Amino acid sequence: MAAGGWFDWTTGDLVTESRFQDIQDSLVFIFSSESAANSALTNKVEGTIFYDTGADKIKAWNGSSWIAAEAGDIEGITTSATSGLSGGATTGTPSLSVSPNSATSGTIASGDEILFGDISDSNNLKKATAQTIADLASVTALITNVTVKVADDGSGSQNVFYMLSGSDTGSGTKTPALDVSFGMKVRFDISDSSLSGHNFKFSTTQDGNHNSGSEFTTNVTTNSSGGNTGAYVQIEITPETMGTATATGSTIETLYYYCSNHAGMGGNGKLSLYPASASAGVSLGLVLALS
């Protein structure tokens, strides 16, 4: 209570004037406005509370004016010199900004944690280690993405694969021949709806099973089936993929892509894993022959 503090009442206690004032000061009064409260509460003290029905707020007397209790208000924010934040205030409406230049410089270690917005979870804030992000950047940098589509080859009777990558636009290039190098990962995106009912496989034999060939699966990863969101086929070019070196190249020099459900879809399209002779005028990146 404002004047006499808390008092434990028992039966028979005398209610003195000061005790009665304590009781009155501790009540939450109800008035339609601050002016109505001021008119009725002529002897209000600091801490007197009333409910303002006009403003729909609880207000307290601070000794000179009424202060409204705001739901969720942050009355003050302070920042440290090394927080990487600027702004803040202990009165009024504080503001806060991210200020990287105010933070202390440091060296990132693999176990340091970094905040990120998870796009797959409504951008909820989550954390990951610096090593996880570095690993992701390393993997992403080595992947060459190729979008695959299926369309007629112009004959009106044969569907084939079309491919796009990088800044390519439109329907893509029909059954291209692609040169790939040691260390590369090539991801063929087969999520386009035109791939529904088709698959995308590799073989050392042109047209695969339609030409008595078998599927090549070494370091090939398949995610979902054609036409589904996120579907892809990825091949990684490693020593295991290329095989033992020969006098002129490697065991696996060429892979043909095909659809096991429909003949002829790969056309003459292929992946060249080993460079042609210099006289052919083909220049590829570094290729290692291991023996």
Image: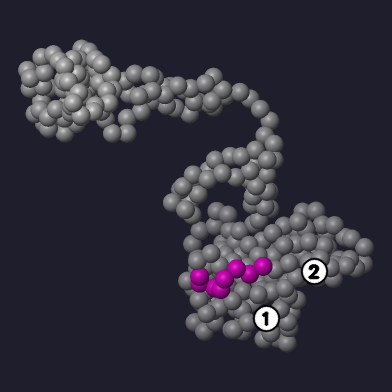
Q: Secondary structure at mark 2?
A: loop
Residue 225 sits inside the magenta stretch: yes
Q: Which residues are magenta?
A: 221-228
Residue 65 sits inside the magenta stretch: no
Tell whether label 1 touches label 2 (CB within 8 Å): no
Q: On the image, which quarter does residue 276 sit in?
A: bottom right
Which residue is found at the position 31% from the left and 20% from the top?
A: 92
Q: Which mark is residue 207?
A: 1
**In the displayed structure image, the side of residue 248 where residue 124 appears, left or right:** left
Position in image of residue 259 (x %, y %): 61, 79
Q: Secondary structure at mark 1?
A: loop
Residue indicated by mark 2: 253
Residue 133 or residue 47, whichever sits in front: 47
Q: On the image, which quarter does residue 168 sit in?
A: bottom right
Using the numbered discs, state the Cα–Cα distance from disc 2 to disc 1 in whole angstroms.
16 Å
Residue 164 or residue 32, whichever sits in front: 32
The colour mode here is one colour
Residue 276 in the image: above or below residue 139? below
Q: Label 2 sits on what residue type?
A: Glu
Which residue is found at the position 20% from the left and 29% from the top?
A: 11
